[in-house]
Amino acid sequence: MRLKKFKERNSKKKVIMIFTVCCVLLLAGVFLYTSYAVFTEEKEFNVINGTYQDPGDIYFAVYVDGEITNTFPSKDSDYYFESGSCTNGVTIEWNNHVWESNLDYSHYEPNNNMATRVKCTLHFKKSHFSESVVACGIEGNNASSCISSYASDNPVDLAYDETSDNNLRYIGADPDNYVLFNNELWRIIGVMNNVDNGSGTKESRLKIIRNDSIGSYSWDTSTSNNGHGINEWSQADIMKLLNPGYESESVGGSLYYNRQAGNCYNALYNGYSACDFTSVGLTSEAKSLFTSTVWHTGSNDVNNTYISIKTSNFYEFERSSNTGKICVNGNYCNDTVERTTSWTGYVGLIYPSDYGYATSGGRKMTRDICLKTFMADLSNWDECYNDNWLLGTIWTMMPYAWEDGAYTAFNVLSSGNVVHNATYTTIGVQPVVYLKFTVKITSGRGSTQDPFRLSL
């Protein structure tokens, strides 16, 4: 008989091996979860006269510049959403402005009885918009052509208005459209096409607006129309305050344009009070960057009151031959001034359409829906006005025509609506200019901390 040495089983080693395998599986699970489940979406879907199967868990795989990551880019980063797709018939839309996804389950079907899990893949890319625009400007190209050329690299902040001029506009709650001008922050409304430089030549020009109001003043307070003023921009008190050539006016004449102090109109019957633009008026350097331009000053017509005008309608009326004087009933219509529908000058205000086209809309009220909504009704749709960087209580330069008077002009309210007010009303003023065709963007990122810098 052959004897063999008894060997005790190594239970400790077995335990270690089992523990090691469990740790590996756990780590693999954590890796997969963090890689593919960066966040979960609330499942929202409607069922009408039928049944549905719970779609189960939703996992997101996030790719940044082609590399998978568990670090989700923030809204304030330099990244934008490029594309996305989901499994099991689910479709995805990404809202750049609120920085979240919207999943449509209307065609949801599991791959089989067990595969109810939905996986969505999101791709983000770094935006090189500001760098491209600056490089373009340094190479000698003008600002309007540079922004237009590289607009496709920054779909978050820019959109065409689809008018006959096809202007490119900054949209959203707070786009990176800041520019250092007049030693202060202004903002780019957009690239406006077919702008008449005053000699008949049409150009694409950057249109910019001061970020803050210079104060609250009357549009006009002349003694015409029983002291209510007139809604004729070419002779309005606020126009004379903003532009050169009215230094002889005893109140307000060219004070802002010349960076001076004096008195400004702010009440009925030519009422005025002290105003001071010695620190916020236009500098010589700023005035060298813009020039005289033809501005449209048309109004609505009698068949289109302010409560039934959409953004596209405003754009057409601004360029129409309608004056601000209809006056069927004859009240407050005793002015005898010559009325025009265009004006050649240096400094103006926004149009109602500038405000309307600046919206990006939101998840429920998309930009397209907002643009089709009557602008006097926008206060009912917070996604239309909250996602609009031009929101504020400010005058526009468009007169309002109606049956009972010729003394009102359109203005924007902080509630989101576009309405009209008597021209003697005191409302915020944010100057607007068209930069020269030759102006270039040579540095900056368009943010408040690093605004675009301009040069000739």
Image: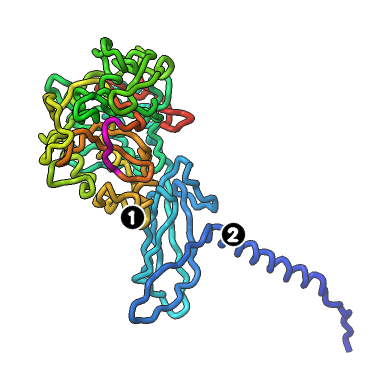
Residue 155 seen by the camera: yes
The residue drawn where x is 48% and y is 30% is 449
Residue 7 on image: x %, y %: 86, 77
Q: Residues within 10 Å of mark 2 (few under 14, many from 20)?
A: few
Residue 337 on image: x %, y %: 13, 24
Q: Residues within 10 Å of mark 1 (few under 14, many from 20)?
A: some
- Left/right of residue 68 with respect to residue 426 in the rendered view: right
Residue 136 seen by the camera: no
The residue drawn where x is 42% and y is 52% is 123
Instruction: Specify start and end residues of the magenta stretch as a single range.
Output: 418-424
Asked if the residue at tag 2 contacts the one at tag 1, i.e. Cβ–Cβ closer than 8 Å, the answer is no
Residue 306 on image: x %, y %: 22, 45
**SS at mark 1 in the image:** loop
* Residue bearing mark 2: 31
Label tally: 2
The residue drawn where x is 18% and y is 37% is 405
Q: Earlier in the sequence, mark 1 or mark 2?
A: 2
Q: Where, by quadrant of the figure, is residue 276 drawn?
A: top left
- Main secondary structure of the magenta stretch: strand
Residue 194 on image: x %, y %: 17, 30
The stretch drawn in magenta includes residue 419: yes
Q: Is residue 111 above or below residue 221?
A: below
Q: 88 or 420, which lies in front?
A: 420
- Left/right of residue 161 with respect to residue 403 in the rendered view: right
